[in-house]
Structure formats: C-alpha cells, structure tokens
Amino acid sequence: MPSNQVYRERVTVNNGPHKWWHHRRFKIIGISVIILIVFAVILALVLNFVVFAPKKSETSTTPSTLSSSSLTTTISISIPPSSTTTTSLVTSTTTLPQTTATTTTQQSEWSVTGNMTNARYVHTASVLSNGLVLITGGQDNSGNILNSAELYDSSTGTWTTTGNMNNGRDSHTVSVLSNGKVLVTGGQGNDYLNSAELYDPSTGTWTTTGSMTYTRVYHTASVLSNGLVLVAGGWNSSTVYNSAELYNQSTGTWTTTGNMHSVRQDHTASVLSNGKVLITGGGVNGISALNSAELYDPSTGTWTTTGSMANTRDRHTASVLSNGLVLVAGGYDGHSGNLNSAELYDPSTGTWTATGSMANARTAHKASVLSNGKVLVVGGVVLNSAELYDPSTGIWVTTGNMTDARFDHTTSVLSNALVLVTGGYNGRMPLNSAELFSLFHTN
C-alpha cells in the first residue's frame, strides 16, 4: 500500500510539469495572436494614412486653386481694363500689378494736346512726308470760311501757322501728291469753287494751279497709282454731279474722264489694291441716300457698277483693310436716321456681306486704319465715343471716350502710331481742341 502511494505521488509530480508546459503553450499562442492583431491594426493604419493618402502636392492644390480663384476675382474688380486676366497670370499680376493685362487685352487712352490757333470744322488734315500735319480751311465760331492753315508737330505737341490759301474753303478735298506737295480742290468759299491750289511744305506757301471744269463741294478726291488725282461727284448748290475729272501734277491741268452711273454727294471713294476706285453710297440733294456702288478703272477711264450695299448711306466712312476688303460703317440712311451697321466689300467677288454692328449709330464721323490692322471710328453727330473694329473677328469694341464730342472733325494716323483728332463741331460751336488716341499692346 505504501508503494502505491509513492507511485501516485510520482504521477502527481510528473503530471505537474506536463500541465505547466501545456498552459504555457496556450499563453504563447494567445500573446502571439494579440501581437498579430496589433501588427495588423498598425499595418492597416500605415496603409490608410501613408500609402494610400494623397500626396502633399495634391493636397496643396485645392487651397492653391481657391486662392488663385479669389485672387483673380479681386484683380478683375479692382482693375476693370484687365477683367480678362486668367489664373495662369495670377503670379505675375501679384508681383507686378501694373502689368496685369493679358496678351488679348488692349488698353487705350485719350490725351489732350495743343489747341489749334483757330476753331474749325469741315476742314481738312494731311500727314506730310516730314511727319507734320497740315490743317486747312473750315468754318470758325463766327461762321467765317477760313483760308488759314497750320501745322502740328507731334514731337512737341504744338501748332504753328503757315501760309494762307488763296481762297477760303470748307468741305473741300485734300490730297498728298507723290512729289510731297498738297493739292486742295473745290469747296465752298464766297461761292462754290472750282479752283485748286498747291501747298509746298519746303516753303510753307501756296500757289494756284489749274481749275476744275465744275465747281464742287462734298466731292471726293483719290490719288491713283499712276499719280493722277481723280475727283468725282459733288454738288454746286443746284446740281448733284455724276461727272469726274483727273488732275495731272506734272502739267497742273485737269481733263474730264468717264461719268459715274449715279449722281452723288457725301459719298466715299477708296483706292483698292488692284488700282481701281470704289465709290459707295452718297446722297442726292440731301433728301435721299444711295446703296449703289461703282468702280472706276484708270486704265480705261470708265465706270462699272458693282454689288449694292444692304443699306442706303451718306456721310458714312469707308476703310481699305489689310486683307483687301473694304469696311463701310454708319452714315445716314436718307429717311429714318443714323446707322450703326457695317458691311464688307470683297473686290474679288464684287459682293457685300454684313459684319458686326457698332455700339453707336454714327454719321459725319471719321475712321482710321491703325498699324495693327484694326479700324478706329471716332465721334459723329453728336458723340465723344470711339470704337475699334477687329477684321479677324468682325467685332467692334468700345474704347475710351474723347474729352469733347465732335463731328465734321479730322483724324490723322501719325508716324508714331498715335491718332490725332482735330476740331469739329460739338453741337453748339466749332472746336479748336485736339486730342491724341494711343493704343497699347501688352505681352
């Protein structure tokens, strides 16, 4: 019996270590599982916040975009001329706020320059080969028809008087000849005139030259590629003409040429790239206006009709564009009022097509083709506004206003690309003021 007891004790003792290892194994397994779970959680967190998280450059894009958007809005409000500024230029506009305009934005401005000696309207202006601008004739504040002339120097912004014409004239024509002299024809003085005279810039004096066959006012004069000057149409207080004549500067004489198909006054004449002259519109006795057009061929001395405009017009403008088309704008339609419409003539087809309309209806305004190919239209009855036509888009955009409203004024494109506007009538009196238009491009 005792031996059996010892055996049990051994068994108990032997079972003690066996059970201890058995429990240890479970503890190790449990701890391992816990460690694996913790590791899995850590791995999941790492994957979630590190591997699959957006990159810093991406997260910073959103606030950067928002900042750019808000910055652009601020710029476009504070600097109206630059309202088209894009977000790609925000950095440059922040650094250099004075140059915020984009390459497609045009900024223009008017500035006053020296006043003429005399107030004038229905006068003429010519850019001479020496860069000076010659102003001739017109009517003054007292209704006097002037024979005086003056010169504008763009380098100083000042005017100086020069020799007087032999006759007072308004509503005459002026042409700069190939020899540098200036030919003045017709107009209204003490009576309707057929006389002509030449200004010599080298001496500042006028000399009479051969007289036209007919007295004319509200006519046109065009310098042809052969050096002759074509005068067409006009009025003499009782008759509207369809006649035309040619001035030869080498002889100082006039010869008649073929008659136009229609009588016209206050029409336009444009020398085309093919050498022909396009005549458009005009009035008849100030009562009705024409929509017809015709072409003069210097090689034959004859006129042929071409396509008619969509609108009847007189006292409108016509501008030969760099692409060879002719832009006609505004004018009086002869019955209901002034026009804001514009049309394009294609010499290759002899047809007209409508293009964008001006913001303002205009008559007795002026148009100038700028060095960048755009067309500046200025003033009219009775406006101080100006607009630019872009041939590449067919669209007009308004630009800054002149200081003075004016019509029957002059415009001249200077050698420095500025546009000089002189005189005119403001609805109450003739003006002696002059202004300069400048167009800036920013890159």
Image (cartoon, rainbow, N blue to C red):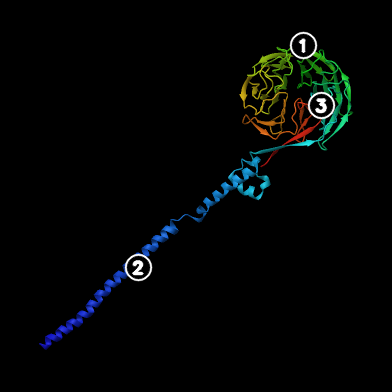
How crowded pointer 3 is (Cα within 10 Å; few <14, some 14-19, many 20+) is rated as many
Q: For residue 431, say whether it is visible.
A: yes
**Tag 1 residue:** 239
The amino acid at mark 3 is Arg
Say which quarter of the image contains residue 170: top right
First in residue order: circle 1 vs circle 3: 3
**Tag 2 residue:** 35
With respect to residue 105, does 61 lie above or below? below
Q: Secondary structure at mark 3?
A: loop
Distance Cα–Cα, label 1 vs label 2: 115 Å
Residue 120 tag number: 3
Percent across and percent down for residue 311 are 64, 19
Q: Secondary structure at mark 1?
A: loop
Residue closest to the eye, 379 or 136: 379
Query: Is 80 placed left or right of 402 in the picture?
Result: left
Percent across and percent down for residue 385 are 70, 31
Give the number of the mark in front: 2 or 3: 3
Name the residue rendered at 23%, 80% in the picture. Answer: 17
- From the image, which quarter does the C terminus lie in? top right
The amino acid at mark 1 is Thr
Distance Cα–Cα, label 2 vs label 3: 102 Å
How crowded pointer 2 is (Cα within 10 Å; few <14, some 14-19, many 20+) is rated as few
Percent across and percent down for residue 227 are 79, 21
First in residue order: circle 2 vs circle 3: 2
How crowded pointer 1 is (Cα within 10 Å; few <14, some 14-19, many 20+) is rated as some
Name the residue rendered at 67%, 31% in the picture. Answer: 388
The amino acid at mark 2 is Ile
